[in-house]
C-alpha cells in the first residue's frame, strides 16, 4: 500500500464514511471508493462493509489498523524531522489525556505551544487511563498524560505527585478536624465513577478494604463534585482537580486521607526514543509546567 492508501484506510476507519473521508483528504468520493477497491484487491480480502448506516471495518481490517497507524506515525515523524532541518516546524501531534489533566494542564500547555509552533496541528483525545493506553498502543495517539498505575508496559516519565483527598458534604463529622481515617469511610455512601476512570482511587479502596456502597454513578469529576455538594455521598478524588474548581460556596469539605495516598502523573508513550520532534517539544513544555506546580 502507498502512504496515501494507508491514510485513506485510516480516515475511512475513523470517520465511517467515504464522503467525509473525501472531504477531509480533499479528494472525490469516487477516488476514495476506487482506492479502497484497489487496496482490497491487493490484500485479497474485503476491508470495509458498506451499509446504509455507514462504513465499518471487517475483522481483517481491524487486524491491519494498528500496523497502518504505526506506519503513518513513522511517516509523520520523518516529515517533521525534514521540516525541522529546513528551519520550520510543521506536522501533527496526537495527544491523549485524562479528564483532570484536560481541565487543569492542557489549558496552560496548548495555547503557548500552538503560539510557538503554529505549524503543528494538535489533535486531542480525552478518555480514561485504559483508553489512553489503548490509543498509545494502537498509534491513535503518540504521547499521553496519565497515571503510572495504568502505564504498565508503556514508556513512562513521572512529572507530578498528586495527593488523593476525600470530599464530603459540608459539616461531615470526623474524629480529627480536616482528616478522615479509612475506617471512618467504612459504611459511607459514595459517589462513584466508572472503575477504569481512575485506577488510583480504585486501588486505594481495595487496599483499605473499603467495599463501596453507592447509589450515584457518574462519568466525570465535575459531576462527582456536584453530587457530593448536594449531599449524595462522599468521594475520593485527586487534589489537582479541586484546585481548578475549588469549593462551591462552602458546600463540601476537603479532608486529608489517613493513611495518605497519591497518584503520579506523567508522560507515557510506546518509546521515548522514537518520539517525533513535535512530541518532544510538547514533553519539554509539560516538564517545565510540572516543575512550577
Image (spheres, helix red, strand yellow):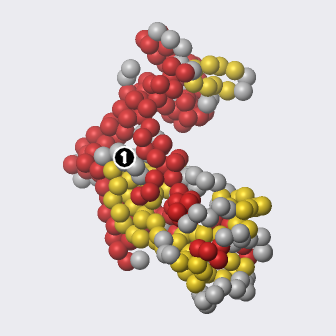
Residue 120 in view (yes/no): no
Question: Does residue 208 appear to the left or right of 136 in the view shown?
Answer: right
| Front-most of residues 91 and 70 | 70
Quadrant where the C terminus sits is bottom left
The residue under the point 74% across, 61% down is: 214
Question: Does residue 206 appear to the left or right of 66 in the view shown?
Answer: right
Image coords of residue 142 (percent x, y):
40, 47
Image coords of residue 241 (percent x, y):
56, 71
Quadrant where the N terminus sits is top left
| Front-most of residues 211 and 125 | 211
Residue farthest bottom in this picture: 177
Image coords of residue 190 (percent x, y):
70, 66
Question: Does residue 84 appear to the left or right of 237 in the view shown?
Answer: left
Question: How many C-alpha atoms fall within 10 Å of the one at disc 1: few (<14), some, or many (≥20)?
Answer: few
Can you identify the residue that label 1 sits on?
Answer: 153
Q: Is residue 248 above or below residue 186?
A: below
Image coords of residue 79 (percent x, y):
30, 41
> Of helix, strand and loop, which one carries label 1?
loop
The image quarter containing residue 77 is top left
Amino acid at each position: 500500500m502507498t502512504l496515501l492508501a494507508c491514510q485513506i484506510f485510516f480516515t475511512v476507519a475513523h470517520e465511517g464514511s467515504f464522503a467525509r473521508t473525501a472531504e477531509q483528504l480533499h479528494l472525490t468520493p469516487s477516488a476514495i471508493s476506487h482506492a479502497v477497491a484497489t487496496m482490497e484487491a491487493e490484500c485479497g480480502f474485503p476491508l470495509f462493509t458498506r451499509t446504509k448506516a455507514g462504513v465499518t471495518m471487517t475483522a481483517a481490517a481491524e487486524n491491519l489498523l494498528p500496523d497502518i497507524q504505526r506506519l503513518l506515525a513513522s511517516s509523520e515523524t520523518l516529515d517533521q524531522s525534514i521540516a525541522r532541518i529546513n528551519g520550520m516546524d510543521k506536522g501533527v501531534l496526537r495527544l491523549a489525556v485524562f479528564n483532570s489533566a484536560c481541565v487543569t494542564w492542557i489549558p496552560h500547555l496548548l495555547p503557548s505551544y500552538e503560539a510557538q509552533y503554529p505549524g503543528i496541528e494538535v489533535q486531542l483525545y480525552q478518555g480514561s487511563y485504559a483508553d489512553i493506553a489503548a490509543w498509545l498502543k494502537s498509534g491513535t495517539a503518540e504521547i499521553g498524560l496519565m497515571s503510572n498505575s495504568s502505564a504498565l508496559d508503556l514508556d513512562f516519565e513521572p512529572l507530578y505527585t498528586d495527593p488523593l483527598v476525600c470530599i464530603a458534604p459540608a459539616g461531615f463529622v470526623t474524629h480529627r478536624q480536616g482528616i478522615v481515617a479509612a475506617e471512618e469511610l467504612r459504611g459511607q455512601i459514595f459517589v462513584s465513577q466508572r472503575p477504569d476512570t481512575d485506577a488510583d482511587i480504585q486501588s486505594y479502596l481495595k487496599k483499605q478494604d473499603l467495599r463501596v456502597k453507592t447509589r450515584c454513578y457518574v462519568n466525570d469529576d465535575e459531576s462527582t463534585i456536584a453530587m457530593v455538594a448536594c449531599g449524595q455521598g462522599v468521594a475520593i478524588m485527586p487534589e489537582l482537580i479541586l484546585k481548578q474548581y475549588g469549593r462551591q460556596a462552602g458546600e463540601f469539605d476537603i479532608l486529608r486521607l489517613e493513611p495518605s495516598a497519591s497518584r503520579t502523573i506523567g508522560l507515557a508513550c510506546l518509546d521515548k526514543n522514537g518520539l517525533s520532534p513535535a512530541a518532544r517539544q510538547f514533553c519539554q513544555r509539560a516538564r517545565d509546567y510540572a516543575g512550577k506546580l
